[in-house]
Image (cartoon, rainbow, N blue to C red):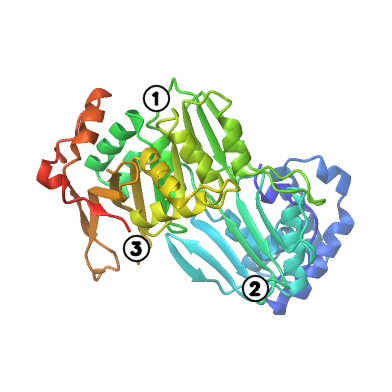
Amino acid sequence: MSLRARITAPEETRGGEGDAHLVATYRGKLLEEIDLAEMSSLAAAERRARLERVLGHILSREGPVLSTGERAQLIRRVVDEALGLGVLEPLLEDASVTEIMVNGPDQIYVERGGRVERLPMRFASHEQLMQTIERIVSTVNRRVDESNPMVDARLPSGERVNVIIPPLSLTGATLTIRRFPRSFTLPELIAFGSLDQPMLMLLAGLIQAKFNVIVSGATGTGKTTLLNALSGLIPEHERIITIEDSAELQLQQTHVIRLEARPANVEGKGHVSIRDLVRNSLRMRPDRIVVGEVRGGESLDMLQAMSTGHDGSLATVHANSAEDALMRLQTLASMSEIKIPFEALHDQINSAVDVLVQLTRHADGSRRVTEIALLDSHGRDPYRLATVARFEPRPMAADGRVHGEFRHFPLPRRVAERLYLAGQPVPQAYGIASFDEQLTTREAR
């Protein structure tokens, strides 16, 4: 059932002041003629059809003279107000919209095709926006008010919703709805230009040989999309445990256990963190652990799992480069209540992390794997990253697109040997680095 179908309370009228009164008037007449108890027993599509039919009779009986198009638009608006999310309803039905951003009642933005655009629509008032927000968060038994001015939740229909209201937000109530597209396969990502075939072959070998992989990138670069696609390379017979703050992964294997963190309830109790779930997962006999995003002390538990027999695990982290990803992991691990010297954390990362896959969102909105780097250092050695694949962009072309080419480099001998022992070939585009070539690996700060 969709988000729209789960939200049934009436709300105040929406923007376009010229006909807001007309919408409010006929919404009131509609609510007078319907049986709410009967409506609640209908499926979402039947409920909408019934409302449209009843409203059509009302307009025929006492409505203003309207053209066919105006009549259809008025019916749509009134039903959206009574049943759905009003001004947001058409956006939720638009499959091309991946994110809806409401910055107070007067500014509504959407993301389409990787580009953000402002729409010529608005809420009628701050109160109407707040009613819409309250309707949304009520579907997950949450509330938003001055004592609880922030809500971050996954809705039953899968959308990720974030709300922040005054006094924390100085621009008014802010609502962000992130919609997750269907899962894409790696061949589909190749068709989109996100990576190339040699990259796919290398990543397939690394994952099947149980290298630990960290996917890094800034917000909106497609980390979850890539992680979901990479998980398809895990053998079917393995037991996989996914751990997420808000469940987004859609693994296709049969032996998958999905865990999701839980926020505190309205009394401030019942909170279950990502770290709690990572710790618990170690007692569940996992072959692989997949963490949607590490953002705190749980990174220490994840690193320890990776370096103590849970090879082949995957996770994502927010970072702008492969080097930054290592520094961020070290910083996040230090946030644990267990106080471990930075030197020991450095050692832990060197022994736990094998592969860093960096994603970048370009100026034209396209998302690409811009680097695959192998961590080729040990113990207390400085981090040494060997870039084995890289996307080299060219300046934006006249067509408004960012073009470039993927380049591939020899694999460190230690990595090639590990692939060989796991029965995985070294893709022809890469080859094996000589001793001199291995000396060119760069040191991360």
Above or below residue 280? Residue 188 is below
Residue identifier under label 1: 235
Residue 249 visible here: no
User: Tag 2: residue type?
Assistant: Arg
Q: How far apart are marks 3 and 2 (CA)?
A: 30 Å
User: Tag 3: residue type?
Assistant: His
Residue identifier under label 2: 122
Q: For this rendering, which residue is in front, 71 or 9?
A: 9
- Which x, y percent locates residue 65? 73, 72
Q: What element carries label 3?
A: loop
Q: Tell me: 241 left or right of 345.
A: right
The disc at residue 299 is none
Q: Distance between the residues labelled 1 and 3?
A: 33 Å
Above or below residue 39? Residue 420 is above
Viewer-nearest of discs 1 and 2: 1
Q: What element carries label 2?
A: loop
Residue 364 visible here: yes
Q: Distance between the residues labelled 1 and 2?
A: 49 Å
Above or below residue 73? Residue 105 is below
